[in-house]
Image (spheres, rainbow, N blue to C red):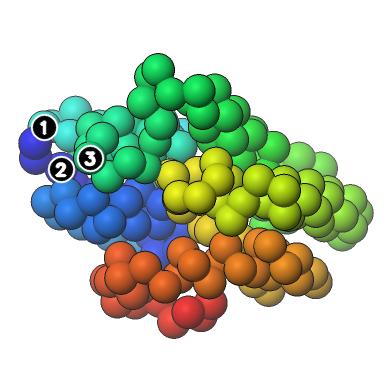
Amino acid sequence: MDMTLYYAPGAASLLVHWLLIELEVPHRLQLVDTAAKAQKSPEYLAMNPNGVVPTLVIDGRPQYEAAALAMWLAERHPQARLAPAFDDPRRADHLQWMCNLANMVQPLFRQWWYPAEPAGDAHADAVRAHCAPRIEAQWQRIDAHLSINGPFLLGDAPTVADFYLAMLMRWSRNMPKPATEWPQLAALAQRMKARPSFAALYAREGLTEWA
């Protein structure tokens, strides 16, 4: 397959980029200058009408949604064991975690970074004040799960959900109470950051913080 990933360093495309490296999938990178609003250009919107990264062009066909792409990559490479098989009892838990991270955790970060979107500029501070404890509640819930069911979300081995969770934890690094304030989450972050693919990802995206 011919693949080109449209990405911005540290954005949601990081999950897909990380998995492409982890799975040793040949691909090209196309930087999207989000500071210049390149993701809102007519050319980019023709590929991804949401105007965000990532977009993964597969054999000339653009696909988007980071969580969906992560699950697809894991299913395309079953030998890596990053997703339970269809008849695995953990399959339902896997899908539940992926949807939970996509629907309950990631949107809160959007509100934190762009509080004017849901409430207008005049209410930005109120949105952030309301949003921070909601993110912290998610960390508490996940940390409690890991303390009983860990060290990874589905038990003894990582899945794409753990890659996803690590990316979201990274996003919290400059918040009043980052995810690594919770002990089980901090331990998971260290495990994920120790993977050789993480170092390769950071080198290719030119990232240094949270290393």
Check disc 1 and report the residue beneath it.
59
Instruction: Please rate how many residues cluster around mark 2, counting C-alpha atoms within 10 Å: few if below 14, some from 14 to 19, many from 20.
Output: some
Label 3 or label 2, whichever comes before in sequence order = 2
Disc 1 residue crowd, few under 14, some 14–19, many 20+, Cα 10 Å: few
Q: Nearer the viewer, residue 150 or 141?
A: 150
User: Which dot, 3 or 2, sits closer to the camera?
Assistant: 3
- Write the residue at 30% across / 70% down: 196
Outermost residue toward the top?
A: 87
For the question of whether residue 147 can be seen, the reply is yes
Which numbered circle lies on residue 79?
A: 3
Image quadrant in which the N terminus is located: top left
Q: Are marks 2 and 1 in contact (CB under 8 Å)?
A: yes
Relative to 71, 162 lies left or right: right
Image quarter of residue 87: top left
Q: At which x and y percent is residue 119?
A: 81, 42
Residue 82 coordinates in the image, percent (x, y): 37, 42
Q: Secondary structure at mark 1?
A: loop
Q: Position of residue 159 (x, y in %)?
A: 44, 45
